[in-house]
Amino acid sequence: MKKLSVILLYLSFVICHLSFAFEAPRFYGEEITVTATRLPQLQVSSPWKVDVIKDLGNKVTLGDALRDVPGIDVKANGYLGSVVTARLRGSTSQQVLVLLNGRRINSPLLGMIDLNDILLDNAEKVEVARAPLSALYGTDAIGGVINVITRKMDKEYKLAYGTYGTRQIKLAYGGTSLGYIRSDGFRQNSDYTAQNLEQQLNWGDLELNLNYYNADKGVPRVPNSENDPYSASTPNDRQKDQNLYTDLLYKKQAGPVSTQARFYQNQLYEQFHSYNFFTLAFDDTDYRTLQQGVELQQTLDVSKNSNLIYGIEARQDRGASFYAGDHAVSNLAGFGQIQLGRRSFNLVAGTRMDKHSTFGYTMNPRAGVSAQVPGDLTLRASLGNAFKAPTLNDLYWNDPIWQMFGNVNLLPEKSQTAELGLSKELFDRLNLSVNYYTTSITDLILWDWDISTNITRAKNVGAVEVRGAEGEGAYRITPLLEVFSNYTWERSEDVRDTTAAYVGKITPYSPQDKFNVGLKAGHFKIVLSHVGERFADGGNTIRLPGYTVISLWTGRKMGGLNASLGIDNLTDQVYYESVGYHPTTFAQLKYPLPGRRITVSIGGQL
């Protein structure tokens, strides 16, 4: 370990100096974002907090890329191929909307998306908007929005090899990108193979984007015991995923009016090959979803810093599975937003009306203001409502064996959020910010067991209160040398539940504190991340201990060749983020996470 530390220290020193040849990054607040308002806007001018992740380094999936962001809690069941979800500001993973280039990709059956199924082969950046955004995007945006924005593909290639036999190949040419990744895994039956195809075509004002993902995964589930962490309780279960995202976009600028029309279709297919411990045979279960939608939007530039946005969206969600059957729901929405801005003042207000085929109408307004006052101090304040529609599983689940049934009369989950924040820039080098927020979430959909009938049914009976504070700081020592840190304190409390013992307890998988400390020097980055203790159950009896891990990434450009080295979990920590049930003993066991992982990659232009 001592020898490895010396080598890494030397390597960091050398590449830190060599990497000063790279372009200087933007400082905090200078990034252009689009997610919070649907328009390009400086971070510092937005009434809502938006983080921009551009230092993707050796990050392969969206799940890996989100760990440094304040206010977000990532929950993983393992390495590549395992399920990874994220919570934003006390929300559930179903209450976080994930976008690909601005359009939704959450599953209509589950209400969420596995973040490990989103590969970052051609990602330019990831924007994380920590705010209720149903006023723009509709359902699922209670905690916020994660938007993966891809770049124009060029003639390029990338080869990577890493721990656990992980190898990756990417080849892009003429708007087409082919990606391949394989890992042997670090546990029994945890191998993973995936292919990714992305296609970009342009015809004047028309743009077609295709993204196809195909994966074959081992499903080990929890180990057989805590003393045997690398074992698999389901050593022969497999899962196959096939996801196709199609997006046809039309953009036209005519004077002060910009028109955009989007037609999209998401096809998600999952086949689960699993051993049935009751019949002692393997079952093949299919899950299919088809989401089709159209968005029409116009932007009117009233003045240099003021504009009006309005539009409509129509969408149909169809899903088919063994327990939920084959059903479809539809949603029709209209939205509008006005932005009034001056050099030091920005006011944004808007609302959206959604008409859902099962529960009817819901309106979700929001308003936010940011103002710069003398002394380079920026103040922010906002209020907003948001909602999450019932999933197809919530509505139509039908399991007569376990007596669990959905409910077609469900209402949407609703939230109200208020936030205050301020940021201060000192000496053109130091940027500090702090935010305080409160969120009240009502009509939570819980599964309520009736002891008299032994039937469990989905009902709107839960409520959660969230309070949190976030602090961030960055100090730019030189144009290419920067230190940064962020800290999140949060209390997410269950205030109404079907189980009386859960009331007053912390919601599962919500750490009270989390912080990141890091250094960036050109194309060198090292981050220490700490996540505090969490509870894995509603009664707060199962504790997941806090953990601290260190990650490092560094790169060098040599002519037309880019070489990089990435190390995750540098000190080889043993830690856990999730708990599951053993399929035969029903014991609650922790999912182990991988140890130190080293990845070396090379790439460049063809």
Image (cartoon, grey):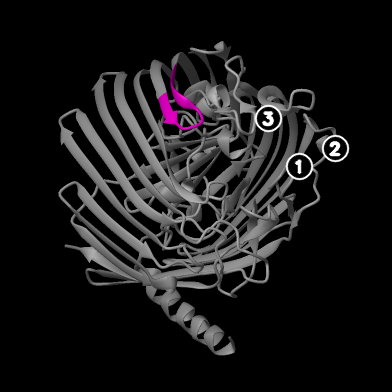
Q: Secondary structure at mark 1?
A: loop
What is the magenta segment's predominant secondary structure? strand
> In the depicted view, which residue is nearer to us: 138 or 524?
138
Res 501 label: 2
Q: Which residue does the image show at 43% across and 66% down from the upper left?
A: 522
Does 326 lie within the magenta span?
Answer: yes
* Residue 391 drawn above or below residue 437: above
Task: Name the residue tied to disc 1.
Answer: 538
Res 447 label: 3
Q: On the rendered image, what quadrant is the N terminus found in?
A: bottom right
Picture quarter containing residue 381?
A: top right
Mark with earlier residue (1, 2): 2
Q: Nearer the viewer, mark 3 or mark 1?
A: 3
Q: Which residue does the image show at 60% across and 35% down from the upper left?
A: 143
Inspect the image, locate mark 1, and give the three-letter code of the amino acid beneath it.
Gly
Span colored in magenta: 318-329
